Image: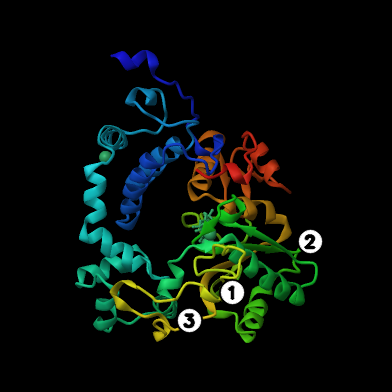
Amino acid sequence: QINEAAAVVFSVPSYACQRRTTLQNHNTVLTEALSLLAENAELNEEDGRAIAFRRSEAVLKALPKAVTNLADLRGLPCLGEHSLKIIKDVLKDGVSSEVETTRQSDRYKALKVLTGIFGVGAKTADRWIKMGISTLHQLQASGQTLNQAQQAGLEHYEDLNQPVAKAEADAIGDVVQKVVLSVLPGALITLIGGFRRGKPTGHDVDFLITHPEEGREVGLLPKVASLLKSQGFLLYQKTTRNSYLESDDGPARLSSNMDRFERCFSIFKLEMNPGTTRSGTPRSSSRTESQSDDHSPQTPGGVHENGLESRRRSWRAVRVDLVVSPISQFAFALLGWTGSKLFEREMRRWAGHEKAMSLSSHALYDTKQRRYLRAASEEEIFAHLGLEYIPPSQRNA
Ligand code: CTP
Ligand code: MN
Ligand code: MN
Ligand code: MN
């Protein structure tokens, strides 16, 4: 084979937490194909399949240049038979028929629309589809009982499915900071999630809050939420208390990666300054402010957000997550909430499989020594785990 000699040799370690994955992706056509199949598997709750596609996707994201030939992939980890077949088709034809068939399938489209409602997961969507509900229209006509999160999700469907820009995240950060400091002077507020990894947009905005004096942070969020609400900033919120207890027998099994911090899931009402379009891209500096994009909702199923139709609004809805950690767990919370999701999952897998340790967003437990390993920074956690430190901007696996 002529290409054999010309094949590029990539060397990629097998766990995503051993790799530096920036936002610069040289293989977007391939990773988007694998990502769609991963997403479809997630929507169908086929977890093993989903993880396999996510791992393949992440390996390709970590490559320093574009793959042009199947031979380039020799020796790379995590690429299973199925992923290789998809890659092969895309390299040959520019598309994969399996990916395109999935993308066009009624079930995939219905799962996307329904899980696009805040508060609706794969299980609920599947139940509705089995009842013949595949669109927002059908859902509304069905008379299904929706919980409060889902009602708010439906009401703000269009806004919540628009990407959130960094400038919008910063504007929300200013509001959150002011209110948090008024309740608890000295509190520290950190932007986490995708924005901390340097992403220009996100599906929500995540903040981690702590206080240098252990214990002062307890019960903060109910006060913050009620102040934000009284000031008109919240369209929906659900606050839960901290339920984490460290035990001498080691960490209680946390169900999947759910943590037990005090937290608030909310929908924020963000006033938009006129220099910002609905998608948040700054408008050219000239005098175009008064002509900012008309807001004419094209919501699938014809639901018109707030019934406003094309009347211009001065605000948009944004999903905001607030998490509070005691300072003693701050480094773990920061690491656990910075993502990406695959990076986190791989780090926990590394801890368990390679180090006999158990990592969560609360703590790191050494099973052999039967003790918790303390850390005051993310760097220390990587060091405990025998991993080279990877900064947030390189955790975009
Ligand atoms: N996370 C978590 N527990 C949850 C929800 C999220 O530990 N119940 C963590 C995720 O593992 C992730 C981080 O919080 O590391 C941020 O989650 P999320 O906002 O869903 O993803 P982002 O990476 O911020 O992506 P996006 O920009 O789309 O918001
Ligand atoms: Mn397979
Ligand atoms: Mn996020
Ligand atoms: Mn989030």
Residue appearing at x 52%, y 49% in the figure:
340
Q: Earlier in the sequence, mark 2 or mark 1?
A: 2
Identify the residue position indicated by label 3 in the image.
312
Identify the residue position indicated by label 1 in the image.
274
Residue appearing at x 45%, y 40% in the figure:
58
- At label 3, the amino acid type is Arg
Q: Distance between the residues labelled 3 and 2?
A: 44 Å
In the rendered image, residue 288, in percent from the top left (x then y), is placed at: 56, 70
Q: In this view, does 57 lie above or below 275?
A: above
- Count up the numbered dots: 3
Q: How crowded is the residue under tag 2: few (<14 C-alpha within 10 Å), some, or many (20+)?
A: some
- Classify mark 2: helix, strand or loop: loop
Q: Residue 212 carries which label?
A: 2
Residue 278 shows in the view? yes
Residue 219 shows in the view? no
- Classify mark 3: helix, strand or loop: loop
Judging depth in this view, the residue of 231 and 3 nearest the camera is 3
Q: Distance between the residues labelled 3 and 1?
A: 11 Å
Q: In this view, does 93 lie to the left or right of 18?
A: left
Q: In this view, does 272 lie above or below 11?
A: below
- Quadrant of the image occupied by residue 189: bottom right
- At label 2, the amino acid type is Pro
Whether pointer 2 and pointer 1 mark residues with C-beta atoms closer than 8 Å, the reply is no
In the rendered image, residue 256, in percent from the top left (x then y), is placed at: 46, 54
Q: Which of marks 3 and 1 is nearer the N terminus?
A: 1
Judging depth in this view, the residue of 119 and 289 nearest the camera is 289
In the rendered image, residue 227, in percent from the top left (x then y), is placed at: 66, 82
